[in-house]
Every structure is written in structure tokens, then in C-alpha cells.
Image (cartoon, rainbow, N blue to C red):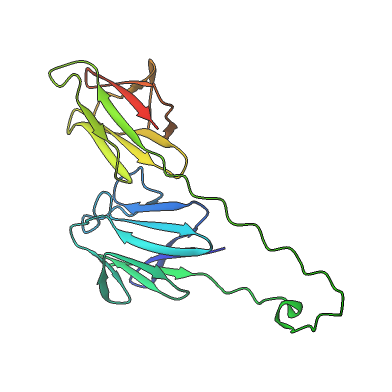
Amino acid sequence: MPKVIVTIDDVVIKEVQLTKDQTTVGRRPYNDIVIDNLAVSGEHAVLRMFGGQVSVEDLNSTNGTFVNGKAIKKQSLIHGDVLELGKYKIKFENHPVAEDFEKTMLVKARPGAVAAPPAPAPAPVVEIHGAIKVVSGPAAGREMALTKIVTTIGKPGVAVAAITRRQHHFQICHVEGGAQPTLNGILVGTEPVVLNSGDQIVLAGTQMQFIQS
């Protein structure tokens, strides 16, 4: 299983197994890998895993994302690659698995042998879409599409929440401010909560509705 090792000045800070379709990296507490340093943006980069391959994408960070010393926007990773975010280094490890000996042998088919059926095609990836519709206040009726991996909503210093897009769902959590958001009347903390289409969100006195398609 692929993993990343986070270090600073050659000191290991943490090791993280990559088990999700996408793993976010940044300074904000709602990221999967949190690096609490001002050189790292709130939402700095995302690691995507698909079909056994892992790629990294910079999320328009202030100081950029580097792979093996070169600035990148998006790049596939191989075992041993080193990401640099400020003074932090993130080493990507994905040890290749040796193929079974039988898979590497060339076997001559016997006369009359029945060919093995073809492997089933992989299931198509269904992309989900979400939006926030403002229900109350001066901006009532306005809709905001949730196109980014992480979208923050609210008023900085008063109440801020983050909505994160996963492969099959969206989730919300409280980020900062004294006023916590509510979801269908229930307070939302720093632990992410899955959103369902039609959910009612209230943040800093503004009522919103989550829509997913």
C-alpha cells in the first residue's frame, strides 16, 4: 500500500498510508495531512489515487509544490519521489509487488483448450457535483458550485466552515470562529460530517441548502 513520510530537517514527523481516493495536504485542520507552518497554504496540495497510480496536484498554493526539486502543477508519482512544501519534505513510497512466477511464464496453449474469458472492464468513475444555495439574507437565491476539493464558506474571524469533495460524497466541518455551523439544526464540530442533498446549513446567521447531483 502506498504511503508518504513527512519530515523536516531529516526528522520524521508522521507517516500516512494512502487509503483514500484523494488525500489533502495543508495547514488547515480539516486536511488529511496537516502541516502547521505558515509556509504551507491552508489547502496546499492533494494526492489522488486511481487504478494503483498516485499523482499530486498543487491547489494554487502561495509557495508552490515541488517534486524532486522542480515546481509542478500536477504530476504522477513513483516510488522514491520527494515532495517539498516549504521546509517540509514528503517522501512517496510505493514498493512494487513482484509478479507471481506463473504470470511471467509463457505457456503454449494445448490443442482444443478454451481461452480464458477477458477480464471485466473497470467500473466507470462517476463524478459528483454539488452546490450551496443561499436561502436567507441579502444574497438569497445565489448558488455557489462546489468545484474545488475544499471550499470554505462564512465570515473570517466570525465563523468559517469547510466543505470537502470526496469521490462519492461531500462533507462539512467547522474551521474557525466562535459560532459553529449547524446541519439540520445540529451543531457541526471539527470532525467532518457527510452531507446529503437537501441538507440545511446555518452559518453566521445565514441559512443555506446543500444540493448534490
Q: Quick check: 87 left or right of 138?
A: right
Q: Quick check: 94 left or right of 106?
A: left
Residue 70 against residue 45 in the figure, above or below: below
Q: Residue furthest left?
A: 138
Q: Where does the image place residue 15, in percent across and percent down from the top left?
A: 47, 61
Q: Where does the image place residue 43, in percent across and percent down from the top left?
A: 28, 50
- Indicate the quadrant where residue 122 lies: bottom right
Q: Quick check: 176 left or right of 111?
A: left
Give the residue drawn at x 28%, y 29%. 132
Residue 155 against residue 54 in the figure, above or below: above
- Indicate the quadrant where residue 160 lies: top left
Give the residue drawn at x 81%, y 80%. 109
Give the residue drawn at x 36%, y 47%. 31
Q: Where does the image place residue 201, in percent across and percent down from the top left?
A: 32, 22
Residue in front for this viewpoint, 141 or 158: 141
Residue in front for this viewpoint, 118 or 176: 118
Residue in front for this viewpoint, 159 or 14: 159
Q: In which quadrant will I find the N terminus?
A: bottom right
